């Protein structure tokens, strides 16, 4: 037998190699080094709720996990009770009437649905439209499907909404899918029904499927953010659209991996067909507990969490202003998206905050070169730690 040689061809597929470089890598390395050296790091970087899942959901899970009916493979499109609870939530919160059997699909976190949707509805060589400052999975999902990702710039002067009138005609002709995300990560921008109506008309005219990522719909401080499906005259049986809702942020359930999509029956079924070939759904017990959560979306613990984020938001925005950073308080989401102090780009600013104050922010330049004078702070640490972060930053000369 000749010796077994190392293969010369790259292990990573071309589509993996095509993903953009991870620009947060340097800040991440410095953060890890600080923590390893024993520094008291205040991490305003992670968009992951810091408080535990409310106890009424844990209790529901404890009961569900003991029920042997929850132990086999889950149902393909989701547990019927979870999908019915999702429909009840949509009715209560947005006034929508949907058929849980045809319009709703359970997802293993909305990331699962977002990443797989292009595989379900976009052909190689077609294009996906999405924000240039946004959740990176819109782009990676498009690349995995062999599609081109066409950026829709988000600009501060437009309230961080894309200018739908400015999308070039050739892009509209090639596109098969358009992503919108409001309340947005990282910009926190909330869209009104006018925006969704404009997007829906444009997509209908150009035969583009419209996908709305509404993962932050329940983290709000002012008006409740709307759903795409509230657009007047939009019929879920006719309009090729889909919207993602997640239990992650609403109920502090990021680790549980539970979300749902609501949309046109064929779009939902196409996504379900891809997922049916990749995973076998989320554990039934988690779906049962998720149903209990959705049915109590107005539980006092959920409302209290919003108040906690509001208190943190106000402390952070006021504190930042004291050090010369004009941070507009977000109306929704748990992100503050703010311009860096004069003279700093985002990597230089976030680098100094970390090196000299042990405070982690996310540099906007990691999302897009267009965002290189902004940074993102997540409201996912307690208010006394936010004040401590501000005190430390205030001791530096800017
Ligand atoms: C805008 C946005 N959409 C979707 C997700 C995915 O959330 P999950 O998969 O937990 O539902 C995130 C996570 O941070 C996000 O920021």
Image (cartoon, rainbow, N blue to C red):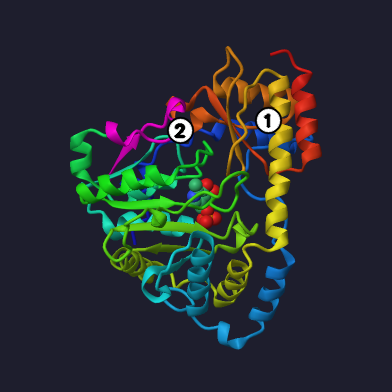
- Position of 313 with respect to 132 (left or right) is right
Whether 260 is drawn above or below 205: the answer is: below
- Is residue 34 something one can see in this rendering? no
Residue 297 drawn at (x, y percent):
62, 63
The residue pinned by badge 1 equals 317
Name the residue: 79% across, 35% down. 40
- Density class for disc 1 (Cα within 10 Å; few <14, some 14-19, many ≥20) is many
- The answer to which of marks 2 and 1 sits earlier in the sequence is 2
Residue 382 drawn at (x, y percent):
77, 43
On the image, which quarter does residue 238 sit in? bottom left
Name the residue: 46% across, 74% down. 78
Instruction: Check whether the beta carbons of the residues at disc 2 and disc 1 lie within 8 A of each other.
Output: no
Start-end of magenta stretch: 147-166
Whether 258 is drawn above or below 200: the answer is: below
Q: Quadrant of the N terminus?
A: bottom left
Indicate whether residue 160 is drawn in magenta.
yes
- Position of 227 with respect to 314 (left or right) is left
The residue pinned by badge 2 equals 160
Residue 162 drawn at (x, y percent):
38, 35
């Amino acid at each position: 037998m000749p010796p077994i040689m190392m293969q010369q061809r790259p292990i990573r597929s071309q589509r993996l190699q095509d993903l953009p470089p991870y620009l947060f890598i340097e800040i991440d390395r410095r953060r890890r080094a600080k923590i390893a050296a024993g520094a008291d790091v205040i991490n305003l970087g992670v968009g992951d709720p810091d408080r535990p899942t409310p106890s009424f959901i844990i209790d529901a899970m404890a009961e569900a996990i003991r029920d042997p009916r929850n132990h086999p493979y889950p149902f393909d499109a989701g547990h019927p009770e979870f999908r019915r609870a999702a429909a009840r939530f949509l009715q209560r919160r947005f006034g929508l009437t949907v058929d849980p059997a045809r319009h709703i699909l359970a997802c293993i976190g909305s990331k699962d649905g977002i990443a797989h949707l292009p595989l379900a509805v976009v052909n190689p060589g077609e294009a996906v439209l999405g924000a240039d400052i946004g959740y990176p999975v819109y782009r990676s999902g498009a690349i995995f499907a062999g599609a081109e990702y066409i950026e829709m710039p988000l600009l501060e002067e437009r309230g961080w909404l894309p200018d739908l009138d400015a999308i070039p005609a050739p892009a509209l002709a090639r596109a098969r899918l358009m992503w919108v995300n409001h309340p947005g990560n990282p910009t926190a921008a909330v869209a009104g029904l006018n925006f969704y109506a404009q997007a829906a008309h444009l997509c209908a005219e150009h035969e583009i499927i419209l996908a709305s990522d509404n993962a932050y719909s329940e983290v709000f401080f002012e008006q409740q953010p709307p759903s795409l499906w509230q657009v007047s005259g939009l019929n879920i049986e006719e309009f090729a659209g889909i919207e993602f809702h997640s239990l992650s942020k609403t109920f502090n359930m990021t680790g549980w991996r539970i979300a749902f999509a609501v949309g046109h029956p064929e779009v939902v079924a196409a996504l379900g067909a891809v997922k049916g070939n990749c995973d076998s759904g989320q554990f039934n017990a988690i779906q049962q507990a998720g149903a209990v959560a959705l049915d109590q979306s107005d539980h006092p613990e959920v409302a209290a969490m919003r108040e906690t984020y509001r208190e943190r938001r106000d402390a952070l925005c006021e504190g930042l202003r004291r050090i010369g950073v004009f941070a507009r308080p977000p109306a929704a989401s748990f992100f503050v998206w703010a311009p860096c102090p004069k003279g700093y780009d985002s990597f230089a600013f976030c680098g100094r905050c970390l090196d000299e104050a042990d405070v982690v922010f996310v540099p906007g330049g990691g999302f897009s070169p267009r965002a290189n004078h902004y940074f993102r702070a997540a409201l996912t640490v307690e208010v006394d730690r936010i004040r401590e972060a501000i005190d430390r930053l205030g001791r530096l000369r800017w």
